[in-house]
């Protein structure tokens, strides 16, 4: 039963409730970094890192500080502070390890702080795995799995989009479609394809 629950969360986060293609969260870095595969992979890895650690820390803060002290109304600001901290850490690591990649990602790297997909997964963890102020069974593990695979779903969408956009660069198209217009059309078609997973049942 527990395995089925974890598998449901994994498949849901990657295919059915993909943050970009189903919930339309995090579209700014999605459209900005998906021109080439290499920056898309790096952005995806950064998002997975931030989502995972943010999911862990926010769950712990909510469970052991916000709930016991009855200050759950501070949830949003607390979660944003945690996310901002991990984004700054990721930014420093990328700058130190790969300045070229840092310049390639540009403004979209610090924009992970305001990426609603990252905040969305932390809020979703609380809404799904806490009932009436009590953590459900396997709440922490489920939150961790949901955070990791939400990032994996985000990365999958980035990779699909970047692969298609790289191929489109080699084709002739009308001027009015070049750049963001064709990106929106492709994103819409990928999103429609992913809607087919909504009928998936265990």
Image: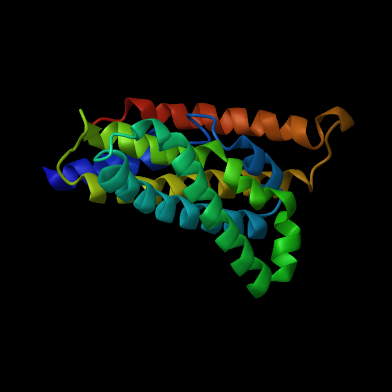
Q: Position of residue 98 (x, y in %)?
A: 68, 71
Q: Position of residue 76 (x, y in %)?
A: 45, 35
Residue 91 position (above or below residue 107): below
Residue 47 position (above or below residue 133): below
2 sits to left or right of 19? left
Name the quadrant of the C terminus.
top left
Name the quadrant of the N terminus.
top left
Q: Which residue is rendered at x = 14% and y = 45% of the image? A: 2
List the single residue furthest toward the left. 1
Q: Which residue is rendered at x = 72% and y = 69% of the image? A: 99
Coloring scheme used: rainbow
Q: Which residue is rendered at x = 52% and y = 33% of the image? A: 21
List the single residue furthest toward the front. 69
Q: Which residue is rendered at x = 74% and y = 54% of the image? A: 106
35 sits to left or right of 45? right
Residue 103 appears in view: yes
Residue 142 appears in view: no
Q: Position of residue 14 (x, y in %)?
A: 41, 42
Q: Position of residue 122 (x, y in %)?
A: 40, 41
Q: Residue 160's quadrant in the figure?
A: top right
154 sits to left or right of 65? right
111 sits to left or right of 141? right
Q: Residue 100's quadrant in the figure?
A: bottom right
26 or 130: which is nearer to us? Answer: 130
List the single residue furthest toward the bottom. 97
6 or 83: which is nearer to us? Answer: 83
Q: Residue 198's quadrant in the figure?
A: top left
Tell how many labels.
0
């Amino acid at each position: 039963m527990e395995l089925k629950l974890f598998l449901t969360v994994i498949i849901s986060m990657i295919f059915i409730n993909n943050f970009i293609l189903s919930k339309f969260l995090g579209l700014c870095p999605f459209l900005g970094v998906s021109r080439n595969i290499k920056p898309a992979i790096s952005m995806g890895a950064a998002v997975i890192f931030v989502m995972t650690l943010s999911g862990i820390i926010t769950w712990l803060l909510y469970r052991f500080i916000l709930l016991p002290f009855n200050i759950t109304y501070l949830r949003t600001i607390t979660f944003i502070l945690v996310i901002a901290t991990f984004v700054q850490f990721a930014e420093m690591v990328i700058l130190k390890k790969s300045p070229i990649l840092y310049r390639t990602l540009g403004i979209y790297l610090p924009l992970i702080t305001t990426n609603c997909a990252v905040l969305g997964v932390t809020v979703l963890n609380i809404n799904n795995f806490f009932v009436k102020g009590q953590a459900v069974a396997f709440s922490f593990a489920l939150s961790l799995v949901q955070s990791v695979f939400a990032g994996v779903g985000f990365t999958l969408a980035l990779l699909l989009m970047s692969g298609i956009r790289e191929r489109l660069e080699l084709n002739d198209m009308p001027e009015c479609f070049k750049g963001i217009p064709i990106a929106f059309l492709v994103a819409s078609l990928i999103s429609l394809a992913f809607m087919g997973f909504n009928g998936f049942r265990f």
